[in-house]
Image (cartoon, helix red, strand yellow):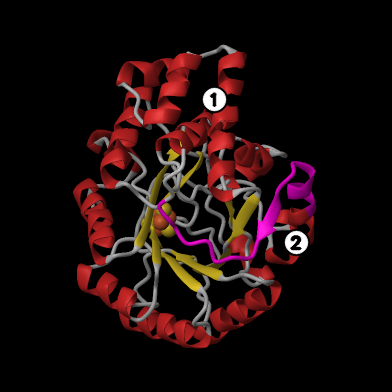
């Protein structure tokens, strides 16, 4: 096993058979070795720096009905909200003061905060904060809209593909949603020039090791600049309310595999990981992640952006908890980087 891990580190390649062995391996020494190799690679590229991104959850209104999502349109228990442009700019102002140089606007696919509104909002953030990166995570949109958002100053876009198996995609999404459209959207974002992020939920209902291998092959082809993976966590008001949460261990293993395959890629230690395991964020970093995304959204709205049960949004997960985050990172030898942390292709191993 260690031999394959060494080869993966050097060549960034691994066969399907070896992947199956790695993903199902029960030998603790081998898994420790995998995590150590991934951490070394992350250190050689980013040092002990952890980039921070200020997350602004701009709306919990969505026209879609993804079966796993707590803010899906059929969930009538959600207190819906939309932040005004002024509120978003206020979040940016607070974040800037705290040292954030990336703002991530995340929300559902909303008809009210429509293309024109989003374009004007991005334009204003760009003109107020020329030195900051603007990341969007707002779902699927027509190519022209993506193009305009890019032209007015958005730099990065996060859109998880969730699964590269069409049948599995259809198990997770209603029939109005299209697997092909999701994949085309991702390719479009890359073509336009966005630093593009994709990813999966580990342990989503119906997911198999074969699906994960397909996901990995798709990412090899797409070459995303960011990879977001977190364990699936059920939400009580969804059709998957009774499903089991995904495995923290498998998530960590995948973070390490992705770090070895894509050494320069930005990989967050996700909120889902921190929500499921007390030291999940630290373990994600020790497995090769190099980004965290504290929450900059107005405190009174955070409970309404509940994608899954018991989502962490306070303490070190929050922007006002940067000191706590800093202390947690120090304990494992890392520190917050206030650099905007763009993707750069590094050539060292
Ligand atoms: S996952 Fe995204 S697109 Fe799907 S229902 Fe939730 S917010 Fe909407």
Check if residue 337 falls in the magenta segment. yes
Residue neighbourhood size for the residue with mark 2, other residues' Cα within 10 Å, grouped as few (<14), some (14–19), many (≥20): some
Q: Position of residue 308 (x, y in %)?
A: 55, 48
N-terminal label among 1 and 2: 1
Provide the residue span drawn in magenta.
Answer: 327-345
SS at badge 1: helix
- Residue 245 seen from this side: no
The residue lying at 63 percent from left, 77 percent from top is: 96
Q: Residue at x 55, y 33 (%)?
A: 252
Q: Which mark is residue 34?
A: 1
Does residue 219 appear to the left or right of 340 in the view shown? left
Callout in the foreground (1, 2): 1
Q: Which mark is residue 321?
A: 2
Quadrant for residue 262, please give it: top left
Q: Is residue 20 above or below residue 138?
A: above
- Magenta stretch containing residue 334, yes or no? yes
Please say if 282 is above or below 84: above
């Amino acid at each position: 096993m260690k031999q394959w891990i060494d080869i993966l580190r050097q060549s960034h390649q691994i066969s399907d058979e070896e992947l199956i062995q790695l993903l199902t391996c029960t030998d603790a020494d081998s898994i420790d070795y995998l995590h150590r190799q991934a951490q070394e690679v992350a250190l050689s590229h980013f040092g002990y720096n952890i980039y921070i991104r200020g997350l602004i959850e701009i709306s919990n209104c969505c026209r879609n009905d993804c079966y796993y999502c707590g803010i899906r349109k059929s969930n009538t228990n959600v207190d819906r909200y939309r932040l005004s442009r002024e509120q978003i700019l206020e979040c940016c102002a607070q974040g800037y003061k705290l040292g954030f140089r990336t703002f991530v606007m995340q929300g559902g696919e909303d008809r009210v905060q429509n293309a024109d509104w989003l374009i004007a909002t991005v334009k204003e953030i760009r003109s107020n904060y020329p030195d900051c990166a603007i990341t969007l995570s707002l779902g699927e949109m027509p190519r022209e809209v993506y193009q305009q958002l890019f032209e007015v100053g958005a730099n990065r876009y996060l859109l998880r593909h969730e699964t590269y198996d069409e049948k599995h995609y259809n198990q997770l999404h209603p029939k109005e949603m299209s697997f092909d459209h999701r994949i085309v959207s991702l390719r479009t974002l890359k073509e336009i020039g966005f630093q593009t992020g994709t990813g999966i939920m580990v342990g989503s209902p119906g997911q198999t090791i074969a699906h994960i291998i397909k996901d990995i092959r798709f990412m090899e082809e797409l070459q995303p600049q960011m990879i977001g993976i977190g364990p699936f966590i059920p939400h009580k008001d969804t059709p998957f309310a009774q499903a089991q949460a995904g495995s923290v261990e498998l998530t960590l293993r995948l973070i390490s595999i992705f770090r070895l395959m894509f050494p320069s890629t930005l990989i967050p230690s996700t909120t889902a990981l921190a929500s499921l395991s007390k030291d999940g964020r630290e373990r994600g970093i020790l497995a090769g992640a190099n980004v965290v995304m504290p929450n900059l959204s107005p405190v009174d709205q955070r409970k309404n952006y509940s994608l899954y049960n018991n989502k962490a949004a306070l303490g070190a997960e929050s922007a006002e908890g940067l000191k706590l985050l800093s202390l947690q990172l120090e304990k494992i030898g890392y520190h917050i980087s206030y650099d905007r942390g763009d993707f750069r292709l590094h050539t060292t191993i």
